[in-house]
Image (cartoon, helix red, strand yellow):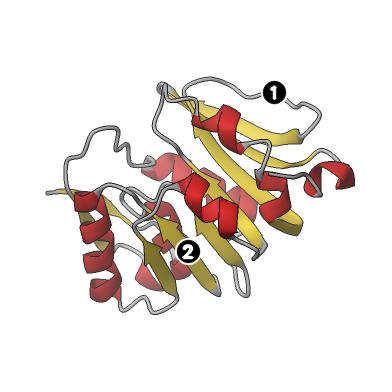
Amino acid sequence: MNQVRLNAGKWRSRVLKFPDAEGLRPTPDRVRQTVFNWLGQDLTGKTCLDLFAGTGALGFEALSRNAKAVTMLELAKAPYAALCQNQRLLEATQARIQQMDARTFLSSNQQPFDVIFCDPPYRQDWLAQLLPVLPRHLAPEGWLYVEAEYALKSDACWQVVKSGKAGQVYFHLLQPASADAAAGTD
């Protein structure tokens, strides 16, 4: 089993174990530290959605920093089972883990989220499919965190507020470009 260590909060230094799985890329510690510096260290009262949970590092890190609730989606069987095991280990009752495809979840979701984490498998065109529909799933003043194999640029739907690069990974913090974008349709 592989492992990743949580950076901060009530579960600081706790280790999450996860299996080898195709396309599974844990968000590096340094990147997670940067992302949570951008979002603020205390996520008290925030609801979060992790569209491609993988190791669960982003979602459990958010819960460790007092997020109210995190919905984690993972379609692959072995990573999903590891997420459930880590949820039990941490006694993370605020985590809602579903073995589900991101598109399927978004097509029926009505709940807005304060923070959405989107770290999809590379070279599968996920961002082109999801970025147009994600504004309507964000709460007012909500944030979208995206990891990709390329740099994102602001466009009609999204404003890139902050970005960085670590190795081959580009990471971004986005907000809807306008109120019209936040009312987007599926």
Please report the residue visible at 67 percent of the width from the left and 50 percent of the height from the top.
143
Q: Quadrant of residue 142?
A: bottom right
Q: Position of residue 75 (x, y in %)?
A: 33, 49
* Amino acid under disc 2: Thr
Q: Is residue 171 above or below residue 175?
A: above
What residue is shown with label 1? 153
Task: Compute the Cα span from label 1 to label 2.
Answer: 27 Å
Please report the residue visible at 17 percent of the width from the left and 47 percent of the height from the top.
19
User: Closest to the observer: 47 or 111?
Assistant: 111
10 Å crowding of disc 2: few (<14), some (14-19), many (20+) = some
What residue is shown with label 2? 71
Q: Position of residue 160 (x, y in %)?
A: 71, 33
* Amino acid under disc 1: Lys
Query: Which of pointers 1 and 2 indicates the residue nearer the eye?
Result: 2
Looking at the image, can residue 33 be seen?
Answer: no
> Which mark, by number, is residue 53?
none
Please report the residue visible at 59 percent of the width from the left and 38 percent of the height from the top.
130
Q: Is residue 153 above or below residue 45?
A: above
Label 1 vs 2, first from the N-terminus: 2
Element type where label 1 sits in the image: loop
User: Closest to the observer: 87 or 109?
Assistant: 109
